Image (spheres, rainbow, N blue to C red):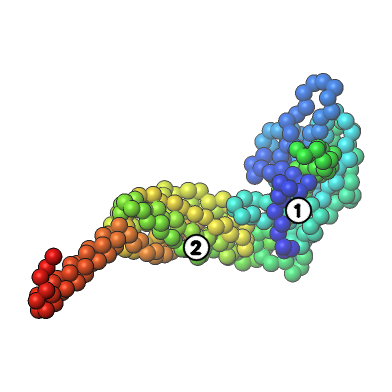
Amino acid sequence: MCPRRRLLAATTTLLLALGASAPTAWSQEQPAAGTEEVHSWALAPAGSTDPGEAGNRPNLSYELEPGAEVSDAVTLFNYSNIQLTFAVYPTDAFNNEDGQFDLLATGEEPEDLGSWITLPQGNVTVPPQSQATMPISVRVPATARPGDHAGAILASSSAASTAPDGKVITLDRRTGTRVYVRVAGPLEPELAIENVSANYSPSLNPLGGTAKVLYRIQNRGNVRLSGAHSVSIAGPLGLFEQHVDAEELTELLPGEGVTLEATFDDVPASAVAFAKVRLDPASGGGAEELASVSRRGMVLAPPITLLLLALATWLALRARRAYRRHQREDRALGVQPT
């Protein structure tokens, strides 16, 4: 896959989220009556008569053999009160830094599923309050790896907009439908916990430190997987244990991962602390049920207050011994104390 570039606010492209359970994402709410120019559209699998309602095809999903080809169609709905011309094109999907389903930036060429999809034309003009249905084909390369592949078909429309600094920019708004293909072959589901690390920030209160646990969950297999993950931290022998209740893991595509963080307050300074991450994978769409996995990490949790107290005590004792030594020397020399 090409290097992944996230769509930043400073660019002129706005990527609209593609829902996993709704046929499409809306570019904005359906237009209200009036003469004001409204831009609103949606793209859905053909057969979904209303993309605002859950239909029998929330996305395009296929199970295909290597080298196989399937034909289908998508429908582009123009809810605007003006005629619009759309760029309609396929692209690849990935998980972004937050673990969310994301798509390649506009203009970035797909190398996986997006490159398998063919449309008859790249630009479509749709009158206001109308729709257009377009055929598509998906052809799996004979050398495609087994397992899950993800992408999307997008409808994009550009419009001029004024930035806060007064400059005119081109805003590219996109919406569409997800596409999933499972290529026949051995399924190898595997979720792993990687790179567990922790740091401890002590405080003057020996019971009030803060610990942060960083860890990465990686999909090492070839099927889409989700699950639940939880984190705990404790001192030696399990003392002072704290834990974060299990949280749902966003679905990770094959080869993708997400870095997560858990913060614990009021962690006693017990010299060392042990972090534990537990992951309970969900079954991956026909893949075998996976066992829970866990991984540990260790962090120093120095009792700063006690160490400072011990240092102060040591310095006081050393000063006292030095004072007494000087007294003995003075007496030996016959010097009278002042």
Image position, residue 185 (x, y; %): 65, 66
Q: CA distance from mark 1 to mark 2?
A: 29 Å
Specify few, some or many for label 1: CA neighbours under 10 Å numbering under 14, 14-19, or 20 or more: some
- Above or below 331: residue 33: above
Looking at the image, is mark 1 or mark 2 nearer the viewer?
1
Quarter of the picture containing the C terminus is bottom left
- Residue type for callout 2: Ile
Image position, residue 4 (x, y; %): 70, 59
Name the outermost residue toward the top: 34
- Residue type for callout 1: Ala
Residue shown at 85% from the left, 51% from the top = 119
Quarter of the picture containing the N terminus is bottom right
Name the outermost residue toward the bottom: 333
- Above or below 256: residue 11: above
Specify few, some or many for label 2: CA neighbours under 10 Å numbering under 14, 14-19, or 20 or more: many
Front-lying residue, 142 or 196: 196
Residue underneath mark 1: 105
Residue underneath mark 2: 193
Dot 1: what SS? loop
